[in-house]
Image (cartoon, rainbow, N blue to C red):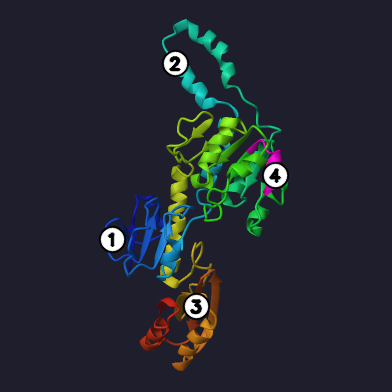
Amino acid sequence: MFNIKTLNAISPVYKNVLDAGEFTVGADVENPDAIIVRSADMHEMTPPASLLAVGRAGAGYNNIPVAEFGKKGIVAFNTPGANANAVKELAIAALLLASRDIVGGIEWAKTLKGRGAEVGKLVEKGKSQFVGPELMGKTIGVIGLGGVGGLVANAAADLKMRVLGFDPFISVEHAWKLSRKIVHVTSQDEMLPQCDYLSIHVPLTDSTRGSFDGGLFAKMKPGAALINLARGELVNTADLLEALKSGQLRRYVTDFPSDEIIGVPNVVAIPHLGASTPESEDNCVDMVSRQLQDYLKFGAIVNSVNYPACPLSASFRYRLAVLHANVPNTIGTITSQVAAQGVNIDNMVNKSRGDFAYTVLDLDEPASQETIDRIAALNFIYRVRYFA
């Protein structure tokens, strides 16, 4: 029996994956083997010794201390793509909000309440202050062509926009899904002067934090609109406000309101609705439940954000899964401990990602507790799991 603790309310679709006979799931679960989290901040949390994995029901994972957890042998997962369609649909709305002053027009129309028969004439007289360009034929730059960015680029192409895409790290899988109408550019500097709209779809990291700043805005086509449904911290707020004030940027549409930008002219701040659809929440919980099930039951790692991907067969006799630092001579040291017991290794997988690595040994015979303890005692080992 595995225990899974929930830090936020989640969709009940997990019941379709996590059989009640094998998994106990709930907010009051103690000594959890895994945690499912949405937005709760885990940075100040002291993880229990029982914790093997954390599953983020969503794509962003800045609320999880992934490196610190990695050193404790805790695998952190996310659900890339599960909410991609929801964010894509909001991006289409953002494009329209960036074009015409729809929000301002709606608020102005409310002020006409009580004017009776005059309303029709007042609307015709006042509507010109809210006009804006059509999307068809305009150029949009999409930075980041992953699960969300690729869908946004394709949707913009379907709207008959000229689409420039930039992503130096695009996977083959995502590249195959792009419309042939997307023009791939090799640098942001090549893209920026051409764009009437710029849509951001990159993760928040130390290198991307605040990277959309005054220097980047100066390279953009004057009067362009910026759309940010990725993370608010990607944009340098002070530089953004200056660019809006000078007219270098015509409009900023974001899913991440902050006190500094709320109420600023030409800012449309949406209250983080990107993944707020019932379908998206169901998809995220279903995906993270399957990932945790496979990891807890037989050690497979898919969509981890700290350890390497390691899809594994569920068919084995005995399995040793070792989470460790990515340092030289690790494999030989681990296998020598197994060999000392005289046990044959039927299959072995070793994968690494940055500072972390994962070695899995499928054995013909049981590993003794003494062997497991010797491996666990090595100074570069974070955790050893044994499946029998």
Q: Which residue is mark 1?
A: 29
Q: What residue is rendered at 57% in x and 21% in y?
A: 130
Report the Cα–Cα distance between label 1 and label 3.
Answer: 29 Å
Whether tag 4 and tag 1 are in contact, CB under 8 A, the answer is no
> From the viewer's perspective, is the residue at label 4 or at label 3 nearer?
4
Label at residue 312: none
Q: Which quadrant does the C terminus fall into?
A: bottom left
Q: Is residue 118 above or below residue 354?
A: above
Q: Which residue is mark 2?
A: 111
Q: What residue is rendered at 37% in x and 88% in y?
A: 370
Residue type, numbered disc 4 = Met
Report the Cα–Cα distance between label 4 and label 1.
Answer: 50 Å
Report the Cα–Cα distance between label 2 and label 3.
Answer: 67 Å
Q: Which residue is mark 3?
A: 360
> From the viewer's perspective, is the residue at label 4 or at label 1 nearer?
4
Report the Cα–Cα distance between label 2 and label 4.
Answer: 41 Å
Q: Position of residue 97 (x, y in %)?
A: 55, 31
The answer to which image quadrant residue 134 occupies is top right
Q: Position of residue 6 (x, y in %)?
A: 34, 56
Q: What residue is rendered at 49% in x and 55% in y?
A: 79
Q: Is residue 179 visible?
A: no
* Foreground of the two, 218 or 345: 218
* Foreground of the two, 344 or 114: 114
